[in-house]
Image: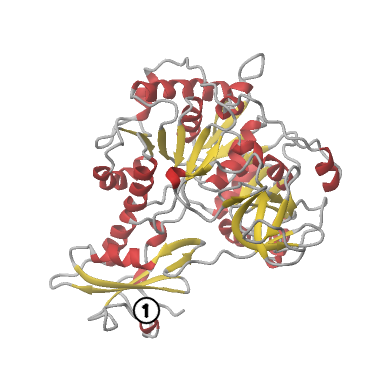
Amino acid sequence: MLNNPRSYEEACRTFRWRVPDRYNLAFDLCDRHALGGADGHRTALVVERPDGEGEHYTFLVLRLLANRLANVLAARGVGAGDRVGLALAPGLEAAVALLAVLRMGAVAVPLPLGLGAAPLAWRLDNSGAVALIVDPGVLPAVALARPHLPMLGTVLVAADRPGPDAPALWPAIEVASDSFAPVVTSPDSPAFLFYPGDTAGRPGGVIHAHRAMIGGLPAIELALGLFPQFGDVAWTPGDWMTPEALFRLVLPAWHHGVAVVASPGPFDPGRALDRIGRLGIRATWLPPETLAPLIEASTGRTFARPRALASGPDPLTADQHEAALRAFGIHVNEAWGVLETGAVTANLAGMMELRPPSPGRAAPGLTIEATEETGLPVRAGRRGILAVSADAPGNFLGYWEGGSGPAERRGKWLLTGRLGCRDLDYYVWPEPLACEEGAVLIAGRRVRLDEIESTLAHHPAIAAAGVIDVPGGLRAFVVFKPGPPPEPAELREWIRLRRGADAVPRWIEPTDALPLTVDGTLLRDELRTRPLRLGGTSPEDRWSGR
């Protein structure tokens, strides 16, 4: 959408939104590159195999497979407007499922892979999902959640063989027709229903329309160095089931006909650096939590440098910018925004000055101000609620089923709920997001301590539990019932399966009793004063100091 401007001012002056009256995102991302004389044999997806080589899939192949899956879902009663849960690792299944759901006019409900049964059940029940497509590793959590999901009629496992109460995806696709006409939708038709990626509480869902990807393109194209450029191949280590990975790299790349690299499996920074040269990656979006491991892994290692690096939405500090520049030889640009707005600000080294921790200026086509609660803008430099033009194409449609959230519309503004300011040069300065009482940040994600304590207390061998946050993770104290105590590894798996990977304590310690007030409230501050345990039954359960 940007025409290779020579300056930020030129980009804003010449920019025009182009949102069609009829717009189906799946058609834009895939069919457009495979129909009407287009070269459908261009590579759309490269899936990295365990040996490091890539399996290439064209836009035509993705279109035909998505048609088949759309027919599979339609035969099981899924129609336009129905919600379909997706919990899939980056790869062919995720690409096909996303395109199939969107082309049907259904609503995709992406679910991060690390969710446990409780947050998974809340999202599926709250959204009213009628179908679910999952990786095999998610099936144990689905089995625990399914008795509480009366509307969930279909579960397909992304494998060649069926799982417990879950037919296999690929045998069903193989016998389905590869002809399916995309549903004609408007730009405002619902396409995605997102929930926050952390496991805390029961958050409301955020509905995004088919136009949402278009709304974020100006910021993404700036942050990725005037993306696309000739020869670009795109990759992100982020989870494709998050709005950040989808809207900041995967979907914009396919919109521009650029191949996307998928790397299933856990994040390995050393392997990630090798992947850049081996698979010809030139543009990448890095979640902030992956930046430090990549910088550390780059020390003493020879690797190919990408053309463009982007990060976000959390702003980077000056130290992070300097460390990344030393490691990669190029600046990391940023694209900031909240779940309800998508990416709305960006910076681009060489085109504008970087002023960390500001993530840049408003993207072309957008206006951002700091406002009062009434929506009245405040003076430059003054603290307020960061607000985006209410008619921005990337703005959400609303909260699902009348739910509530931090964002609200006030006149011509969409107030994001994030505090911050903008300076005289229109750089935006968001403040760090504060956690509500009872929640803590672990690896950048919110968890609620009382939810972990309740999950532990439901274990048949545990009478009570108390959890605190300490440098390095979570520390749990448990009071066992009479009988043989379970191993720490068993308790960790108990929590992971029910709450998710983010909620698993790093240290679990037995105690005779928990400190309580007269009314039974846990005294966490007293737990924090307890001495560190220097020994343990296993290396992972052993304290070595703070």
Q: Identify residue type, mark 1.
A: Arg
Mark 1 crowd level (few <14, some 14–19, many ≥20, 10 Å Cα): some
Residue drawn at (76%, 63%) of the image: 379
What is the tally of numbered marks visible in this picture?
1
Is residue 187 depicted above or below 174 in this figure?
Answer: below
Q: Position of residue 279 (x, y in %)?
A: 62, 39
Choose between 109 and 32: the one closer to the eye. 109
Is residue 273 depicted above or below 358 in this figure?
Answer: above
Q: Position of residue 73 (x, y in %)?
A: 38, 25
Whether residue 235 is visible: no
Left or right position of 412 against 513: right
Quadrant housing residue 188: top right
Is residue 530 depicted above or below 239 in this figure?
Answer: below
Left or right position of 383 against 297: right
Furthest residue toward left: 483
Residue picked out by circle 1: 524
Residue drawn at (34%, 24%) of the image: 77
Choose between 20 and 169: the one closer to the eye. 20
Left or right position of 31 against 325: left
Whether residue 382 is visible: yes
Q: Quadrant of the N terminus?
A: top right
Secondary structure found at label 1: helix
Q: Position of residue 241 (x, y in %)?
A: 48, 43
Q: Position of residue 323 (x, y in %)?
A: 69, 63
Residue drawn at (56%, 45%) of the image: 245
